[in-house]
Every structure is written in C-alpha cells, then in structure tokens.
Image (tube, grey):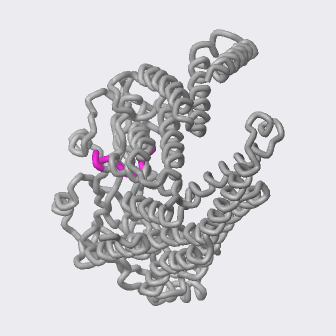
Amino acid sequence: MPDRSEAQSLADRIRTLRAELSDPEVSRILQLTDEQQRRFHAWAEQSLTGLERDFDVDTTVTQASLSWGMRLAATLGGVALSAALILLFERYWGNFETWMQVVCVMALPLLCLAGAEYASKRERTLYFAGLLSLMSLAAFVLNLYIVGQVFNVTPSEGALLAWGSYALALAWRYGQRFILVLGLLLLISYGCAALTASFGYYWLDFYARPEHAALIAALVWGAPRYLRRPSFAPVYRATGAIVFFLAITALAEGRPVTYLPFDLKTVQTVYETLGLLLAGGLVWLGIRRRWDIQVSIGAIAFSTFLLFRFHSWWWDLMPAWLFFAIVGSIGVGLLAALKIIRRRT
Amino acid sequence: MKVNPLLVTAAVVVVANAFALTHAWLNRTGADAVVTLTQDELMEWSPGNSNSGLAFRLQWNGWELGPEANAWATPRNLELLGFDHSLPADSVDAPEFYRRQAPRRAFAALEVTHLEAAPLRVIDVARDPVALRGRHPNAGTVIILPAVVAIEARTARRGQVDVPGTPARISGRITELPTRIHIPKPFSAELRREKLRDSKVKFGLHLRYGNLLEPWVTGIDFPAPH
C-alpha cells in the first residue's frame, strides 16, 4: 500500500500520460483503436478516482496549486500557533504552583498529539494533523525547558535527543517532511554535542568541531538505504548533504578546532579540496540516480568551494574587477560544459 | 508483536519527563551545600514583562581578569584539567596553540564572601566535585557548581603611570557557570509583595544545593527595618 506522496506521484504520472495521449501529434504517431482508447480512459478515471478516494490526492493542476498553498498555510499556522502557545504559557506560568506548572507543560504536548491523531482520522490530506503535530513538538520543547527551569537542572545535550526523537516519531506518524527536517537537525546536533561531551568538552561547544557534524550528516545522508519509507529518502539525503557541506565549508574557510594534526593553512586546503571533489561527485551521482535535489545541492556546494579557492589563489594578485571577470568567464565555460553533458545524457 | 506507533510517540514525552523528574528527585535527596544569599549576591533575571516567572542570577567575579581573580589557574591545576600548557605564553604560536584547545568541563568552588565588590568568588576548580568538596569542606559558605573552563595565553601589557605592566602568561577562564535560580511560589509571591512596598527591599534567600549540585529555594526572609 503506497503512502500519500507515492499515491500523488502515481496520480501525476497517470494525469501526464492521459494529457499526452490526448495530444494530436502523439495521437498521429501512437494510433490507438477506439476500444483501446475507451479502456485506457476508463482505467485512468478509475485509478484517479480510487487514489482521490483513498488518499485525497490532487487530480487536477488547480488542486495541486491549492495544495501547495494549504501546505504553506499549515506550516506557517503551526509555527505561529506554537509561538502563541509558548508566549501564553510564559505570560501566566509564574502564577502557578510548581506541581501545576509541571502538570501543564507535561499535558500540553500529549493534548496536541491527541488532537493530531484525531485530525489524522478525519482528513486524509493531514494538513491539520501536521499543524497540530508541529504544535505538539513546540509544546514538548517548552515542556522540557520549563521542567529544567523549575528544578534548576543544569542544561545538557539529553534534551536535544528527546526533542529530535519526538520530532522523528511525529514525522513518521503523520508523514510530515518539515518536522522530519527539524528532527534530523536536532538529532545531528545531539550527536555532535554527545561526541563533544564524551571527550570532556562542553556540550554546547559542539559547533566548534565541524568534523563531528560532517560525520553524522554523512550517516544521515546514507540512512535511506535502511528506511522503509521511500518518500522520506530525499529529505534525509537533502538534510544530510546540506549539513555536510556547511560543516566542510566551516572547516575550509573558518578557524575551527580540528582533528587533523596540520597547521591551519594545510587543514583549510585539505577540506577545500575535499569539498570540491565531493560536491562534484554528488552532482555526478545525482545525475546517475536522478536525484534532482542532490544535483542542485552538489552544484551550489561545488560553485561555493570553487569561488573560495579562486579567492584564495587570485584575490591578492589582481584588481577586483579582473577577479570577478575571470570568475564570470569560468561560470560561462561551466555552463557550456554542462550544456554538452545535458545533450549527451 | 506489532508496536502501536502512537504509543511510541507518546512514550517519548512520558519517558523524557520521567527522566527529568527522577533527576530532580535524585538531586533533592541530599544537600551538598546550604547557603543564604542576599540581594547583593543575586541579580534579578528579567526577561521582560511578557514572562511572569521570577528568577535570579548569581553575581560572581567572572568579569575580573587580573591574576588574583584567577588564582586557581595555576599550571598544575590547568594540567589536571586536561590542558597542555607546554608552550610559553610569549611564543609567537601561543595564541593559536591555546585557542585550538577546546574548553573543558570541570567544577568550580565559589565562596560566599558577602563583600560588596565581589560577593561570590571562584576560589578553586577541579575535575572531580568530591575532591573539590574535600578541599573546601565548609558547606555553609562554599558552593560547588559545574563549570566550563578554557585556557588562554594573555599577552604582556605595558605599564603606565601608576599602573604596573603584566608579563605574558598562561591563564584559565571560566566560560560557563549555571547561575540561574528559579524562585517558585510562594517565595516569588512574598518577594513581589515586599518589592511593591519597597523596591530596594533587603532579603535573605535560603538555598540548598543537592547531590547533583543543582539549587532549590527553601525559604526567604526579610530583615526587620531599623
């Protein structure tokens, strides 16, 4: 049984096929008998009706446009209502006894979760379930934050693990990609913080060692091999790739603490070269596997590393206008090269 | 056996809360220090009118940079904290060498001095809180807190008229200290009531620091005006 995004993809393919077969030029080349045409249209209609009934998928272009608007509205609404929930609690929590504060903040995420579950049973599009699950996540963040404040608990990385796990559980339960991204970012942060703390350093300094983030992001990127939900695979890969290249950029261009036993200049050159090679490799892999988002991320990372490399080679040797003229010319050359590759693939 | 995903999701909330509450309970099953702090050692933490909670921050001598303020940062102590201080402070490579050593987790002993200039002073730092308490056994005037310590190379400063110069030196600095103390009801209500009468009201806040070195308020009193 496919999930909703797979059902939407199937509906899109049927819709495109039906539109193409109705095109006069295609009809001239692919001549179907009246009987074949009747059977095809009956099958397409039946399939789309079935998908619409079971998954509430978009079966027209107008519906698809409206769905994007609804998804955006649900996310923005969820963020705004979460902020309202947190601010409302902060406004009045000082008037409650400690036990009431704890009970309130513990109940809030569970109540929102119950609301999301109820909404998911009532609507197959899951917009309201998504909105309520985002509120539930925000309420859980508030929950642990307030319990920590009330009992003066010394902050630790454990909260990131709890928040990330809850976000992932919500995302998988209600098929929410935005919450999945938040969950993955929280878990990557937790992994970095736990590694940092395990070496005796302060957990909140986890951003100071981008190598940890690069390693965990690479694991997230490879995780879809072991997942049973193909529609989530692009989210895992995109989040992993973006965090990975941000970490490599920090290593190549910043002054980070690193495990490499070399001087700063050598460390930067190593990571800049690595970034270039891996970004190029990602573009190649993305084209081969038809991972469009990976191609875009790889191309952006490749251009960024190339620009940084050119900057470190030439910026001091030539006037600024000549530097940008050369970079622009290289961009035009790359465009031409990619055009040739595009024609051949 | 098929696990209900809804129950798994709800279980994350329940388990995380159970963990946090057990942590708080474990902390309160004993006391590492019992101190009374006054308005001079505490600064009100005000997040704005939109937050009805009341909290204070400990006032400690973190802003002082002189050698006497960081007397605990001896070469031996820095070594015990896990830092490498082998490069002389006046070496060209010293700033980068010490910058690349990430801050470390440790424990700091703060003495309640009741002095106006620096009411709480860091007097010692160690990796082991039990050993630190052994060195400073007075639980009525010394509190032990988890801390984050960084090593740094301080450059030499030229002397000026009336101000002697200081040579380059390796020092330690506390970069993080959990100083926030939440004031629950009914103590927060009492304090607010007294503050309405006199905005500069003097008070003594009774605190216990538990097994896990986290504080809680056990009482508040207001000295009778002269």
User: As rendered, which of A34 and A30 lies closer to the eye?
Assistant: A34
B222 to the left or right of A158: right
Q: Is residue A228 magenta?
A: no
Compared with A97, B176 (above or below) is above
Place residue A291 in its image quadrant.
top right
In-front residue for pair A28/A176:
A28
Whether residue A162 appears in this view of the structure is yes
Image coordinates for residue A53, horizontal then vertical, percent: 64, 69
Magenta stretch?
Answer: A198-209
Looking at the picture, how far across and down is residue A343, in whole percent? 67, 21
Question: Is residue A204 inside the magenta stretch?
Answer: yes
Residue that sits furthest to the top in the current view: A317
The percent position of residue A64, horizontal first and vertical second, equals 73, 56
Relative to A314, say whether A145 is above or below: below
At 42% from the left edge and 86% from the top edge, which residue is drawn? A99
Residue found at x 61% / y 65%: A55
> Seen in the image, is B128 located left or right of residue A298?
left
Q: Answer with left or right where residue A56 lies relative to residue A256.
A: right
